[in-house]
Image (cartoon, grey):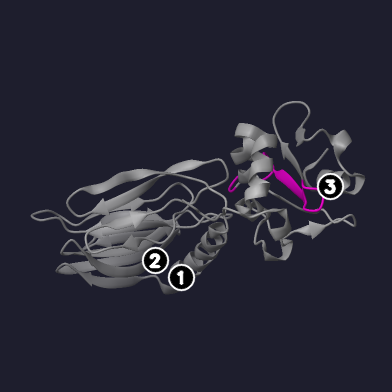
């Protein structure tokens, strides 16, 4: 299954929109199953979702998405999360079981989830995937609750090659791994470390280019900048990749390949970005 890392661009936008919406529209109220759902701000400045005064969820970012019908039940969907660098919101599912009180459950992982995909009988949640990673996809239904539907693995776009790379079209340099040739080269070079390095690039922006034509960027781990910051360089003409990441040991920064094999200008850019 092809899952594009550029979805993290959407996640960042959702996080920003969520913060703005939560701050601008609280308090709110919504009629639901004979009662009222409310979003109010607590004394700690986070947002509280409640049904007729009973707390269902609490997050720094919390706002109403929509109400849908699933399996014959009214289901209210809210977005909630802790906010922060490059972390989107999760979906909060609210429903009233037969002969029971209104309940809620949060779907997704620790750093956001894509928008819910709603069908007549179920709601599906497809995870964001980083290079080298696999995660469970979730499914929710009124009768069965939230369950694992299966496991999805990151896959680059088939048939893409070095010639297809265009740094101007990359929201984040991690998106370069969508290219099949880049992913294969990165996996061969980094092995199991590919996911950690990609995570260290998530909080970042666009790319710069050296005079020799190598485009590059640095970034950091969401909520943990300064501890495992990473750097990536791509030379599409020579079909070469360059990586570096901070760590706890010595040397402080690990590089792939060894620094002696780096172009001087790229090495300087890397050391300026994440240290020597």
Q: Which residues fall within the magenta stretch?
A: 222-239
Residue 150 visible in the picture: yes
Q: Residues within 10 Å of mark 2 (few under 14, many from 20)?
A: many
* Residue drawn at the location 84% of the way across and 47% of the way down: 272
Measured as percent of width and height from the top left, residue 254 is found at: 75, 33
Measured as percent of width and height from the top left, residue 230 is found at: 71, 43
Instruction: Tell which tag, 2 or 3, sits nearer the viewer.
Output: 3
Name the image quarter holding residue 244. Answer: top right
Pick the residue in front: 24 or 137: 137
* Residue drawn at the location 34% of the way across and 65% of the way down: 39
**Mark 3 highlights which residue?**
272
Q: Is label 2 in contact with label 3 (beta carbons under 8 Å)?
A: no
Name the side, left or right, on which 26 lies relative to 233.
left
Name the side, left or right, on which 61 lies relative to 229.
left
**Mark 2 highlights which residue?**
63
Separation of residues labelled 2 and 1 (CA atoms): 7 Å
Pick the residue in front: 249 or 124: 124
Q: Is label 2 in contact with label 1 (beta carbons under 8 Å)?
A: yes
From the image, which quarter does the C terminus lie in? top right
Name the image quarter holding residue 8. Answer: bottom right
């Amino acid at each position: 299954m092809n899952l594009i890392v550029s979805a993290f661009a959407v996640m960042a936008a959702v996080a920003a929109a969520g913060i703005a919406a939560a701050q601008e529209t609280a308090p709110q109220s919504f009629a639901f199953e004979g009662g009222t759902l409310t979003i109010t701000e607590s004394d700690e400045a986070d947002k509280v979702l409640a049904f007729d005064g009973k707390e269902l969820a609490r997050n720094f970012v919390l706002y109403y998405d929509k109400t849908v019908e699933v399996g014959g039940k009214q289901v209210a969907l809210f977005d909630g999360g802790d906010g922060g660098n490059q972390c989107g919101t999760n979906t909060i599912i609210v429903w009233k079981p037969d002969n029971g009180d209104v309940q809620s459950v949060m779907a997704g992982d620790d750093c956001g989830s894509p928008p819910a995909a709603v069908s007549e009988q179920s709601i599906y949640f497809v995870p964001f995937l980083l290079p080298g990673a696999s995660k469970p996809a979730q499914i929710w239904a009124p009768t069965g609750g939230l369950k694992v539907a299966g496991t999805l693995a990151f896959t680059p776009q088939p048939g893409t090659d070095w010639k297809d790379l265009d740094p101007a079209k990359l929201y984040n340099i991690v998106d370069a791994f969508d290219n099949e040739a880049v992913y294969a080269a990165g996996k061969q070079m980094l092995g199991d470390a590919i996911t950690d390095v990609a995570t260290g690039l998530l909080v970042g922006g666009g790319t710069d280019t050296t005079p020799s034509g190598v485009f590059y960027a640095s970034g950091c781990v969401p909520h943990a900048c300064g501890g495992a910051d990473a750097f990536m360089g791509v030379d599409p003409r020579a079909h070469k990749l360059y990586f570096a990441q901070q760590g706890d040991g010595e040397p402080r920064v690990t590089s792939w390949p060894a620094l002696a094999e780096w172009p001087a200008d790229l090495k300087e850019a890397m050391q300026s970005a994440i240290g020597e």
